[in-house]
Image: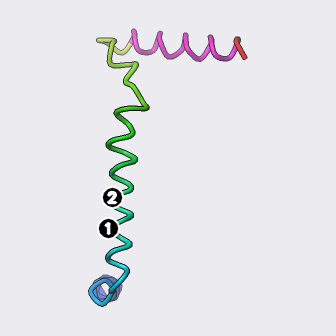
């Protein structure tokens, strides 16, 4: 409980720290929410069942390992 109060009181007394935490949270949101949509397409979403997904992944791993 003392540790919780320590961090709570420390965060309350911050001045520039709150702004820095806000910037960090905004950057994390951009990285994980927005960039994921544009740069990491959902290749496995085109398959309906797990065996088809497994076949696709194993085929891609083999194809990429044999074609350097």
Q: Which residue is mark 2?
A: 26
| Residue drawn 50% across the image and 16% down it | 57
Mark number displayed over residue 47: none
Q: Position of residue 51 (x, y in %)?
A: 39, 11
Q: Position of residue 35 (x, y in %)?
A: 39, 40
Q: Is residue 13 above or below residue 23?
A: below
Magenta-colored stretch includes residue 57: yes
Q: Residue at x 36, y 82 (%)?
A: 16
Span colored in magenta: 51-66
Instruction: Say whether marks 1 and 2 touch (CB < 8 Å).
Output: yes
Instruction: Estimate the spatial distance between the alpha carbons at disc 1 and disc 2, rounded to whole Å.
Output: 6 Å
In the rendered image of this protein, does residue 19 appear above or below residue 23? below
User: Badge 1, how many Cα within 10 Å: few under 14, some, many 20+?
Assistant: few
Q: Which mark is residue 22?
A: 1
Image coords of residue 29 (percent x, y): 33, 51
Q: Is residue 57 left or right of residue 13?
A: right
Q: Nearer the viewer, residue 4 or 60?
A: 60
Above or below, comparing residue 34 to residue 37 in the picture: below
Number of other residues with Cα within 10 Å of mark 2, as a class: few under 14, some 14 to 19, many 20 or more: few
Residue 68 placement, left or right of 17: right
């Amino acid at each position: 409980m003392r540790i919780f109060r320590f961090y709570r009181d420390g965060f309350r007394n911050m001045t520039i720290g709150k702004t820095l935490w806000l910037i960090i949270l905004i950057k994390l949101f951009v990285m994980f929410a927005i960039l994921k949509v544009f740069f990491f397409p959902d290749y496995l979403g085109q398959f309906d069942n797990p065996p088809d997904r497994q076949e696709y992944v194993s085929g891609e791993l083999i194809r990429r390992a044999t074609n350097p």
